[in-house]
Image (tube, rainbow, N blue to C red):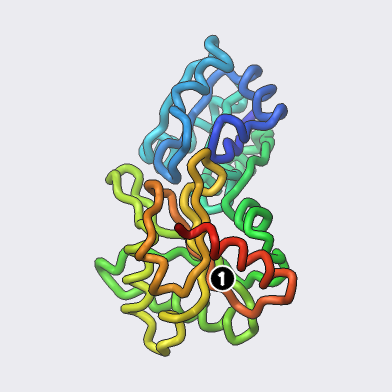
Amino acid sequence: MLVFVGLGYSLKHLTREAYEWFERANVIYVDTYTSLYEDPLELLRDINPRAEFILAKRRDLEGESIARIVERARREVVAIAAPGDPFIATTHDAILSEAIKRGVEFKVVHGLSILTMAYSRLGLQSYRFGKIVTLIYPEHFKPLSTLDVIYDNLSRGLHTLVLLDLKVEESRAMSIPEAVDILIDLDYRNMLRERLSIALARLGWRDEKICAEQLYKLKNYRYPPPPHSLVIVGRLDPVEEEIVEYWKKKCN
């Protein structure tokens, strides 16, 4: 059995179902490279000290490793744990695809994701969000397609959740001030600088910070370290306006 387990972003986010599958597992791979986690991932070892426990790097869960993992799951319970929710902004669909090809049974155990937390925590209506985008560092090319999606969402009055680049294995994570500078620099339609936006710092963590302001002003506030995200706000309904006023007061 191959079990994909969503960890949320803190040990307090673990579901009862996640605990139950960890206790049954013969081996637990913990993804350490697709996102950041509030608590030390080594603490997951305590749930089932009998299991083989692997803090996995990219090479452990990709490429040639996939076939070995799937074949082992044919005879044992193999858990692959990832921050957030499996298959939302993660890279493990290749393992799932291989399991399906080989006829290996699998299970998905869901966890909190940045998507559900952003919608629920901010009080913005989920159906008023458009397509999600990731803003990457413009080192090799300008990610103008990210801007195109934001523009398209705004044209329809929709909010945009902007995930910020994470290069965990390089110890590099885009911050809100960096993202603001990049977006304003790339903004070829001059639509974003004064656009109402919401900064999300460590959403769901104990030291989270949420701040609503014009985009260019968001870089003037202090935030806890990443992971960070942004919401570019579209057209607000009256209830959303009231809630956003609350987040404006939380900036200082």
* Residue 252, horizontal then vertical, whole percent: 45, 57
The residue at which mark 1 appears reads as: 160
Above or below residue 30? Residue 176 is below
Residue at the far left: name it. Answer: 139
* Residue at screen point 42% across, 59% down: 164
Residue 144's quadrant in the figure? bottom left
Front residue (pair 87, 172): 172
Front residue (pair 39, 63): 39
Specify few, some or many for label 1: CA neighbours under 10 Å numbering under 14, 14-19, or 20 or more.
many
Above or below residue 187? Residue 29 is above
Query: Which structural element holds mark 1?
Result: strand
Residue at the far bottom: name it. Answer: 189
**Would residue 164 be found to the left or right of residue 239 on screen?**
left
Amino acid type at mark 1: Thr
* Residue at screen point 52% across, 66% down: 212
* Residue at screen point 42% across, 36% down: 32
* Residue 9, horizontal then vertical, whole percent: 54, 40
Looking at the image, can residue 67 be seen? yes
* Residue 185, horizontal then vertical, whole percent: 31, 78
* Residue 179, horizontal then vertical, whole percent: 37, 65
Residue at the far top: name it. Answer: 50
Above or below residue 48? Residue 148 is below
Q: How many labels were placed on the picture? A: 1
Q: Report the quarter where the N terminus lies.
A: top right
Looking at the image, can residue 83 be seen? no
Above or below residue 49? Residue 101 is below
Residue 110's quadrant in the figure? top right
**Would residue 147 be found to the left or right of residue 22 on screen?**
left
* Residue at screen point 56% across, 30% down: 11
